[in-house]
Amino acid sequence: MRSRLRVTPRGFSGPAVRFGVPAAALIVALMFGAIILTIAGNDPFEAYRTMFDASLNGWNAIARTLALATPLILTGLAAAVAFQMRVYNIGGEGQLYLGAIAASWVGLALPSTTPMVLTLAAMIVAGAIAGALWALLAAIPKAYFNADEIITTLMLNFVALSLMNWLIFGSRSFWRDPRRPVPGGKRLTENAIMPSISGRMHIGIIIAVVAAILLWWVLRKTSWGFQVRTIGDSPRAARYAGMSVRVKTMAVLALSGALAAIAGVTEVSGITKGLEPIALTTNIGFTGIIVAVVARSNPLGVVPVSVFLAAIATSGSRLQSIGINVQVVLLLQGLIFLTVTAGEFFVTNRVSLSGSVKAATADGPSEIAEATA
Amino acid sequence: MDGDLARLEVRGLTKLFYGVPAIDSVDFDLRGGEIHGLLGENGAGKSTLCSVLSGLYRPDSGTVSFDGNEVQFRSPQDASNHGIGMVYQHFRLVDSFTVAQNIVLGLHKSQRPRSMRQVESMVADLADEFGLHVDPTASIWQLSVGEQQRVEILKQLFRGARILILDEPTAVLAAQETDRLFEAVSTMVDKGHGVVLVSHKMAETMEYTDRITVLRRGKNAGSVATADSSPAEVARMMFGDSSAAERTRFDTAHDIGEPVLSLSGVSVTGDHGLVAVDNASLVVRRGEVVGVAGVAGNGQRELQEAIAGLRPLVSGSIEIDGVDCTSSGPKKTMRAGLAYVPEDRLGVGLAPGLPLEHNIALKSYDRAPHSRRGVLSNGEIEETMDRLVKDFDVRGNRRGMRVSLMSGGNLQKAILARELNEDHHVLLAAAPTRGLDMAAAEAVRSHIVDERADGRGVLVFSEDLDEIVHMSDVILVMFKGQIVGRFARDELDLDQIGLLMTGSGLATADTNGAA
């Protein structure tokens, strides 16, 4: 009598499962993290308390965390909208640079007397368009020749990075401030800078949250979103129902690129206040992919997940100050990502232990693979 | 092993899937030195029987004896070690490996020579011996389909197979390659090997086999010596005798009106660029059910896709209710009034991972009442769903549950409900009752037949000849992409239809073409 694990699809999961499983995953991650911290010679309780203090305890800490969460929400949404259609945009990083380049160009080019609302709106629009066009460089080959977007969007990141570096370090471009001894971008004038709400936190957080709600609404409540969800589930069924998979592929990748680019706009306008390649290359685009995966591509889930990841990241420097290696922070982040994504399996499947092999094969689930082989 | 004839005996073999028998108490014998044809419609249980014999499935009851000893195969490898090899219709070869590498792939070190050079010369000898010529050093991607098939056969012979199961080996071959294949097969048989030939094709089965076993609905419908039998007898075994057609048929009293679907000279290519539908013409009129009989894979799916606008035409034209829908795309055929129940429910007809309400709105999401100005009205969609669920008796749905967890019968009713809920003039239904239990199948059939009472036309494709006879006013037969026979309800000849479905009896067919 061998026991065997039995896996049955749940079909649909109630809120207890949908929220309980990630919470349990988080606890598991923190427990593993505690073991690692102990091995590294640190007190895990002190470490976790420091993390909490640094990122969530008090208004200043929260403002720091939300400032970091702002671009993460946007790149997270960028990845999420593409994932909804099972298109994999790994190019959020490069699209973000393009958004930063375009927005800083508009911000620098417009006269400093232009009203702030107009300037910021123009910067967002310009950034979004640049990001969308950059994404289309991958979307069009995908739609017409089925070129793998994972490769093309990934490769375009390096092109975008080189472009941005060249503008500041390799040329005397419009963006570069000739007066500074160390190459850097021209500083944006006041009307092109997103006003601060508190400390580093600026109005970009509002833009990001509104974008999340809007995107959720578009995906859930409009016929356009209906098509995206259908294609994401079954391109053949979508074609059968008369939907154009090609047009939607391009539209969704363009939208994804635009969202990632807006993260570039908020960063360049609210944080770096000029095109600063070093300060802009902090893997926000790539982290957005992690955000989308953990949030299960749900736009509303992207917001708390971004805040959570930002909280872990902001506590990094404080942890170092109490003598914990920064690598441990990254390790914790990885652990949480791993457990939450692994938890996904338990959200969609019910796992139970069956008494014997016979029982498991007699009525089905484990035989599904066999029957369809 | 030469001269030592293999004997395979199967007694009372049963294999259940979800409690439903795919094969039911099947007896089957194979002797070394013979080619044994295994015939039957799709779903008759041929593949299941072969999969049990080759160790892929374990039977629920019954025995398999090999050379008089009862055997239980744990895996295909185990079956292969016993000397039973299967050649699948879809090859299992690694494209970038050479022939010799593929042949030894998966063999344990102790089962193969150490150097590839040695393998190559052994393969070359084996190829010579059986007339299966192929270069052992060539990569798979360089080979034609026929050559790849030879590699598959050589692979089994290399492993010492004395019984070879060939699953529809000629489906992928050109005529000349078919001849070469059977030359090789007869060499094997002369050397005492036993060969099971799984086939749909009457002509080749009659020509090459020594005996024929027919499976019908999971049961052995009889084994005959080929020489003592006739195509007509075998076709009767496959499709049932004429008496089955005498069972109650749907009422015929209804008015036939204008054509709602007309195809003239339609030709389309299949997924691999070969001709799939060849100059097909047909007409469906209001108040009429036209049934298309045929063994799967004779161009039915491609023809359906052409009608639905999913597959462009190479030549010919299609009209739906007077609107030209030639290569027009699915949107236009929907607007012209085509309701389409596709063969592949979960792959095409439904988005399997999404809930029922989404699938109910799959084609009407962009129109009132289900959406206005691009904004979905989820309340209206749910109302439609509730109404259809009630009218069509769709069960097993829970709010938010993905539809792939519903049973086949309920899925089919849901698709039918959605399609019939749209404004339409003609219903195209493919294999509408496949895999359904009796009650669900009957419900689906009566919904379909009710269509003609409302003055709509119906074109229904099915492999189940009884069902076609049961429902149709006009019966067409498809074979190799052509419509090879047309029978009005009162001039039905089941034997003749059975022969046409398997590609024989063409000469005497009543091919009036479309009326």
Image: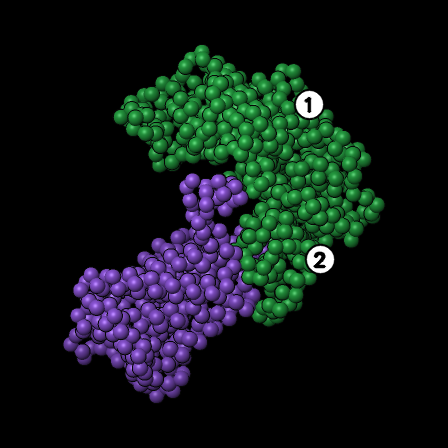
Chain colours: A purple, B green
Give the x, y percent position of residue A123: 37, 77
Q: Is B429 situated left or right of A232 in this image?
A: right
Q: CA distance from mark 1 to mark 2?
A: 44 Å
Residue situated in front as seen by the camera: B109 or A245: B109
- Point 32% across, 62% down: residue: A29
Q: Position of residue A360 (x, y in %)?
A: 48, 44
In the image, residue A111 sits, relative to residue A155, either above or below, namely below
Amino acid at circle 2: Asp
* Residue B308 can be seen in this image: no
Instruction: Examine the image and state in which quarter residue A170 appears.
Output: bottom left
Task: Give the answer, above or below, for where B240 lies relative to B318.
Answer: above
> Residue under circle 1?
B233
Chain containing mark 1? B
User: Does B131 sit above or below residue A168?
Assistant: above
Marked residue chain, label 2: B
Q: Nearer the viewer, residue A82 or B30?
A: B30
